[in-house]
Amino acid sequence: MASSSSLFIFATLLGLVSWQAAAYDPSPLQDFCVADMKSPVQVNGFPCKDPMAVNPDDFFNPAMLDQPRDTMKSKVGSNVTNINVINFPGLNTLGISLARIDYGPLGVNTPHIHPRATELLTVLEGTLYLGFVTSNPNRLFSKVVKKGDVFVFPKAMIHFQMNLAHDKPAAALSSLSSQNPGVITIANAVFGSKPPISDDVLARAFQVEKDLIHWLQSQFWENNNY
C-alpha cells in the first residue's frame, strides 16, 4: 500500500512532467522570467526580474504542502492552499501552478471554474465525490475517487469535490495548466457580487420570488481559498 508521502511525491511529479503538453499560457521566450512584483510596468502577466539578480530562492517555495490545513473555520468545510505566481514569482511564464485542497468530514470544494486552466487532481487521502459540468446542454461527468486516483477537469468547466466521509478528513493535490489559473466560485459570483446583480435578473433566471433572491444575497459568501 502506497504511503501518503509517496503519493504526494507522485502527484507533484505527475503535474510537473505533464504541464508542457497541457499549458495554456504563452510559451516562454527565455529560460526563465522570475516575476518582478515591484515593477511599475503593466503587462499581460508580470515583467521579468533582472536575470543577474535571480537566485535559487526565486525557484523555491517552502509551501509545506505535505501538511494538513485547518478546515474548521470554513463554512463549507474545505481549505484551498494555492501555489501560483502571486506567491511564487519563479512560476512566471512557466504555465503551471499547484494547489493543496483539504476537506473536513463532508467538506465541499464548492462549484467553481478556473477560467485559464485545466486541472489535474490527485487524491492524497480519503474518498471524494467529484465532477464537472459541460457547456450547454450541461452534461454532468461525476465519479467517486479514492486515494491514489487521478481525475481531470477540463479548462473553464464548472467542477466540484466533496469528502464522503462523515468522520475523517480528505486531501488532494491539484496541478493547473496556468501560472495564474484564476477562480470563479459560482454561488459567490451570482449572489455575492459587488455591486449585486439585479434581483429582477436573478428572479427571472432562477424562476423564484425576489424575497428568496434577497435572502440569498444577504448571506455571507465565503472564499475557501486562503
Image (cartoon, helix red, strand yellow):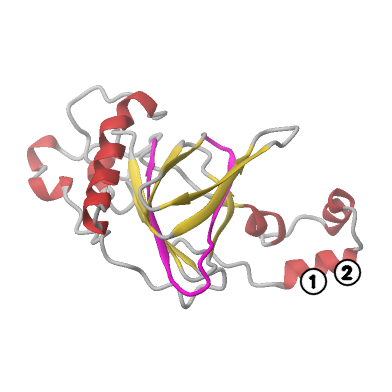
Residue farthest along the front direction in this orientation = 1
Considering only vertical position in the picture, is 9 above or below 43? below
Q: Position of residue 70 (x, y in %)?
A: 39, 73
Residue drawn 90% across the image and 59% down it: 208
Considering only vertical position in the picture, is 162 above or below 43? below
- Please tell me which residue lies in front, 163 or 84: 163
Query: Which contiguous range is marked in magenta?
Result: 155-177
- Please tell me which residue lies in front, 71 or 45: 71
The residue labelled by disc 2 is: 211
- Asked whether 19 falls inside the magenta stretch, the response is no
Residue drawn 22% across the image and 35% down it: 33
Q: Which mark is residue 215?
A: 1
Identify the amino acid type marked 1: Trp
Q: Position of residue 27 (x, y in %)?
A: 32, 24
What crowding class fits label 2: few (fewer than 14 Cα within 10 Å), some (14-19), or many (20 or more)? few
Quarter of the image where one finds residue 91? top left
